[in-house]
Amino acid sequence: MARVVPTYRARYAFEGMRDLQAEVASGKAAYEDPRQVTESVDLIQKLAGHTATALLQSATAYRETSRRPESEENRKTDVLLGEAAILAQQLAQKLQQALESAKTIR
């Protein structure tokens, strides 16, 4: 069985979010009630949580696949990806808080 290249999955996620944003902005797609908004935010919250994990996996992959894992560039990349993962997790937490509040909207 062939392995899936992580880049393809990241591309699909990016394309989906890009299309969502463009379709709502253009009016091609529209929210009709608060439940649709809440469900969309719930899915985006989950995406943010998975993004945090994927960023940490990417940092590990740089260390494992680099010819010079001890290089300054790899160290910087590792730190920056770690910081980005923290921010993604914080985003996921904020979205979860927003969801708690949004569930009361009718």
Image: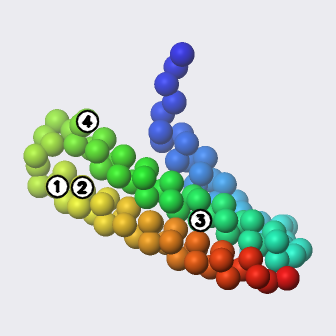
On the image, numbered disc 1 is attached to which residue? 75
Residue 45's tag is: 3
Disc 3 versus disc 1: nearer the observer = 3
Q: From mark 3 to mark 1, how far is it between C-alphas?
A: 29 Å
Q: What residue type is labelled 3?
A: Gln
Q: What residue type is labelled 1?
A: Arg
Are the two marked residues, 2 and 3, in contact with CB atoms closer than 8 angstroms?
no
SS at mark 1? helix
Across and down, in percent, residue 81 comes to 32, 59
36 lies above or below 101: above
- The numbered disc on residue 65 is 4
Q: How crowded is mark 4: few (under 14 residues within 10 Å), some or many (20 or more)?
A: few
Of residue 101 and residue 5, the one placed in the foreground of this image is: 101
Work out whether residue 15 or residue 41 is closer to the camera in this orientation and state it.
41
Left or right, 30 with reference to 56: right
Label drawn at residue 78: 2
